[in-house]
Amino acid sequence: MKLPAGKKGFLVASTLVLAVACATPITQAADNALKAIALKAKVIVNGSEAKLAKEPVIINGSLYVPVKALGDALGQKSTWDNATKTLTMQPYPIKAGVYTWKNAPSLGLGLKEGGFSGMTHLPGDPDDVFYLIADRGPNGQITIDKSVNRTFPAQDYVPRFYKVQLVNDEVKILDTIKIKLPEGKTNAITKSRDTTGFSNIASDEKSYDNTGKTLLPLDPDGLDLEGISYSPSDDTFWISDEYRPSLLQIKRDGTIIGRYVPAGDKEKLKDAQAPIFETIPAIYAKRIANRGFEGVTVSPDGKFLYASIQSPMAVPDKATGEASRNLRILKMDLSTKQFVGEYVYVAEDAKSFVNVSQKDVVISDLHALSADVILVDERDKNEGSAAQIKRVYKIDLSKATNILGKEISKELEGTSIDQLKSLNVNAAPKELVLDLTKLNYPFEKFEGLTVLNKNTILVANDNDFGVGEYDANGVLKVTDKMSQVWKIEVKDLW
């Protein structure tokens, strides 16, 4: 890119200011030769200094600035094609790849495996290899005698996660890892170490068979999986569960090491075969049904875990939670397995959008960039052209107030944004990194989020295993929603 020196109109239009600290001649040949002067200079774009790999130079009165640095500062990717001698500048974000799970295995009734709810990349793995966790299995809703019942069409489904490779335009399954109880333990329903996706206790949302008429047995070890992350400190995975809500530490082979639940829940799960630890604050048992822990992430150094509640909780009641914008993010010290932080994340105001309910503005995943800086997947319930919130925000929890154990934690959902400010409670500051609606993202449930490098984000969708509605005869309809992973290039994340 050539910038004529002294032409202020161009500089102002680009919102670029050049500050020259000093000038040193580096080439001074014959009088009729080009003269280049290197500049110790700053290039400031929109108030921020652009990082320059090479100094700008003036050649015969024209100013030359490294185009990649300038493009980065302007939020654009610069690509040089030497064969065609073409320079292309493209604004971020950029859809760099779409990968579809083709020919997924059948689960019966026309349903197939899918339901990607969380995603992670392990340090040291190839750049095209990832882990994806699936939901609790196919589940739908049918109305029986005016009661809306939760159905489980594939009752033998075992909660699982996948090791996958993104090849060409496909999601290739390298390994399927089912979640199982510790050695020597037997699940009362599966009669093996395999777990189920069924509800845990009587106060949970009840589980029915595909007709919606036969109640299925409770499983204190049942799991509704939503997020996955990896701890490099001990080579284990952490997964989030909506039911209690709970957090599970598992081995690479899917064996449960421990399940962490709200204080007071251990007695409710007295018949569970997995080790139960009551370390989560008791108030988290007041999560709204089917709105428990959604996102989970471990800091790159393996020292801290963060978990996010999907929606504001029923504190003091469900109506208050559904009207609230205040969501909670917990922080665990992985060396002690104790929680050391709780922070407020303020969701977008539904009133600023069209046909968006506040209760449907949720957090669906997290990804830690450092010990305190986290990416947050925030979305609405709409899809296709109706979708308005499919966003990734960057937050810095070092700038947020730790409310763990404080009085405000007992009444957070009913506290207004202005009241938080008056109490000197700082919510996590939000910086928009990615708006998927700008890329025509077609899915409602943007639920998986991970980072490959400082310029690459990957997202995955939960397609609900193709579960649709039930017709008037009680027959389940199957949708053609796909399970996909999108690779997206963004401006520097760090």
Image: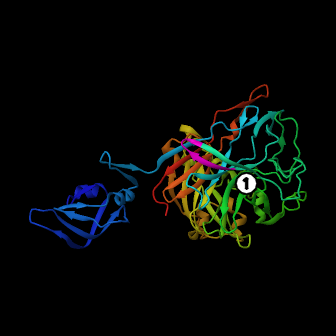
Q: Nearer the viewer, residue 365 or 172?
A: 172
> What is the x, y in percent for residue 190?
87, 47
**Residue 485 visible at all:** yes
Residue 129, given in percent of the width and then of the height, sits at: 60, 52
- With respect to residue 489, does 29 lie above or below? below
Q: Residues within 10 Å of mark 1 (few under 14, many from 20)?
A: many
Q: Position of residue 6 (x, y in %)?
A: 19, 61
Q: Which residue is the site of mark 1?
A: 292
Between 168 and 276, the one lying in front of the other is 168
Identify the residue at image location x=12%, y=62%: 33
Position above or below: 476 against 248: above
Q: Residue furthest top?
A: 473
Could you tell me which quadrant the N terminus lies in? bottom left
Q: Nearer the viewer, residue 34 or 135?
A: 34
Left or right: 151 as drawn, with respect to 217:
left
432 relative to 478 in the view: left or right: left
